[in-house]
């Protein structure tokens, strides 16, 4: 289950995420406001004004749809400060581009963050903020060039100096970081017939389609495919009405088995969740990890990770259907934990397997950070669609998309 959206909405997950990092009172909020040319974050001389990350979806010429993320100072202290820094780390894991603000010659914390972003291949831009107020700005500039091997941008939000140069650097970083990916990968091309099977049950928002369906339909139209959409109960009638078999059938994971049993032999079959497993994550790691499901026992522990924070309904796929399928196979004693939104345990070693949703509400950078976290701790991680296909005994029968 995910949120419904209108067809003309640009979801935040598809936008370039730009996070601004720096010490308390380093000028992050003022810089973001100057870049956006509007008041997004509260600006104050009082340290710790920004607590939770502030996210602003917007359009910037040359960058396109993006999300500007203001964060708490990474030198925040005290018990509450530590919690703020933990939230800042979560925001950092979503960043496609990081802007690190330098506010003095002590750059130890900035270097740690620079190394963090460098290790996960995130483009970094260094900025000397409030450059008009710093007496030793040349010393900071010289040291920064040595430490980060790149020239920082000199900015002043108050005088709006350096903002155009920062925009230019951001545009360059976007072009470098932009990875062209398709939801349907290499599965279809122009004039291929594609049939979408989309149950409109209690979980489907009234009058709207869920986000993966909207995005998939739009991409298929952009690829000039021939698209037909039906509910599960009309699948048989739709197949009979067609003069040729569809090249590809995309279904909701919940009816994977039923659609597989009805589909023409010539038609490829996949699901929205499986498509998003490849689009947002590591499909091969998901498939490899699904094999762990065969070894689960009533002493095992499973983590189900949702990305959206909807109010659960009856027959919810993550909270009801997948646990029910697992317990039917393993036994009622199987322990299942469920997290949602950005809640994701740091210590994953107590789990035998993680089952991640399609993650349509998050960008790929964040999903990959979860996968790397699991992989580094030796914990298998799979996906709703892949897990359901395995539990139904058809994982080897479905088609996995590959990026061209």
Image (spheres, helix red, strand yellow):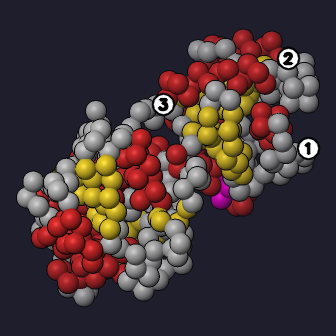
Horizontally, residue 400 falls left or right of residue 69, namely left
How packed mark 3 is, by other alpha carbons closer than 10 Å (few <14, some 14-19, many 20 or more), is few
Identify the residue under disc 3.
178
Q: Mark 3 near mark 1, Cβ–Cβ under 8 Å?
A: no
Query: Which quarter of the rendered picture does the C terminus lie within?
Result: top left
From the top left corner, tell me how far across and down residue 208 is, in percent: 52, 68
Residue wearing tag 2? 136
SS label for mark 3:
loop
Which structural element holds mark 2?
Answer: loop
Identify the element where label 1 is drawn.
loop
Say if 104 sits above or below 140 in the image.
below
Counting from the top left corner in percent of width and height, residue 118 is at: 50, 29
Which residue is found at the position 44% from the left and 49% from the top? Answer: 218
Q: Nearer the viewer, mark 1 or mark 2?
A: 1
In the image shown, does 121 or 83 lie closer to the viewer? 121
Residue 98 relative to residue 233: left or right: right
Res 348 → quadrant: bottom left
Magenta range: 81-85
73 magenta-colored: no
Viewer-side label of 3, 1: 3
Marks 2 and 3 sit apart, C-alpha to C-alpha, by 36 Å
Could you tell whether 271 is left or right of 129 in the image?
left
The residue carrying mark 1 is 45
């Amino acid at each position: 289950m995910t949120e419904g959206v209108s067809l003309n909405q640009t979801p935040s997950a598809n936008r370039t995420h730009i996070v601004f990092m720096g010490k308390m009172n380093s000028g992050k909020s003022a810089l973001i406001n100057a870049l956006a040319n509007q008041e997004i974050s509260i600006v104050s001389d009082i340290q710790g004004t920004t607590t939770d990350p502030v996210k602003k979806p917007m359009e910037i010429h040359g960058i396109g749809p993006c999300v500007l993320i203001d964060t708490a100072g990474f030198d925040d202290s005290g018990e509450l400060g530590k919690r703020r820094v933990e939230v800042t780390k979560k925001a950092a894991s979503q960043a496609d581009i990081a802007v690190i603000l330098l506010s003095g010659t002590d750059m130890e914390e900035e270097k740690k963050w620079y190394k963090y972003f460098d290790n996960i291949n995130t483009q970094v831009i260094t900025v000397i903020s409030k450059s008009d107020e710093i007496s030793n700005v040349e010393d900071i500039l010289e040291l920064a060039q040595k430490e980060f091997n790149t020239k920082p941008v000199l900015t002043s939000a108050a005088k709006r100096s350096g903002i155009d140069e920062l925009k230019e650097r951001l545009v360059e970083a976007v072009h470098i970081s932009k990875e062209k990916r398709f939801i349907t990968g290499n599965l279809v091309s122009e004039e291929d017939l594609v049939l979408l099977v989309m149950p409109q049950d209690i979980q489907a928002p009234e009058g709207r389609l869920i986000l993966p369906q909207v995005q998939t339909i739009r991409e298929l139209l952009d690829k000039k495919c021939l698209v037909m959409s039906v509910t599960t109960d009309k699948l048989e009638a739709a197949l009979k009405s067609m003069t040729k078999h569809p090249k590809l059938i995309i279904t909701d994971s919940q009816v994977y088995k039923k659609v597989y049993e009805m589909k023409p032999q010539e038609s490829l079959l996949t699901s929205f969740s499986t498509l998003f497993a490849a689009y947002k994550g590591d499909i091969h790691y998901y498939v490899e990890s699904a094999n762990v499901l065969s070894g689960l026992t009533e002493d095992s522990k499973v983590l189900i990770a949702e990305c959206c924070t909807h109010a659960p309904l009856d027959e919810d796929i993550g909270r009801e259907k997948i646990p029910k399928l697992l317990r039917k196979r393993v036994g009622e004693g199987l322990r299942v934990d469920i997290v949602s939104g950005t809640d994701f345990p740091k210590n994953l070693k107590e789990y035998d397997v993680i089952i991640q949703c399609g993650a349509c509400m998050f960008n790929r950078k964040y999903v990959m950070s979860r996968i790397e976290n699991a992989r580094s701790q030796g914990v298998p991680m799979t996906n709703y669609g892949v897990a359901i296909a395995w539990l139904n005994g058809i994982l080897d029968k479905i088609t996995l998309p590959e990026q061209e």
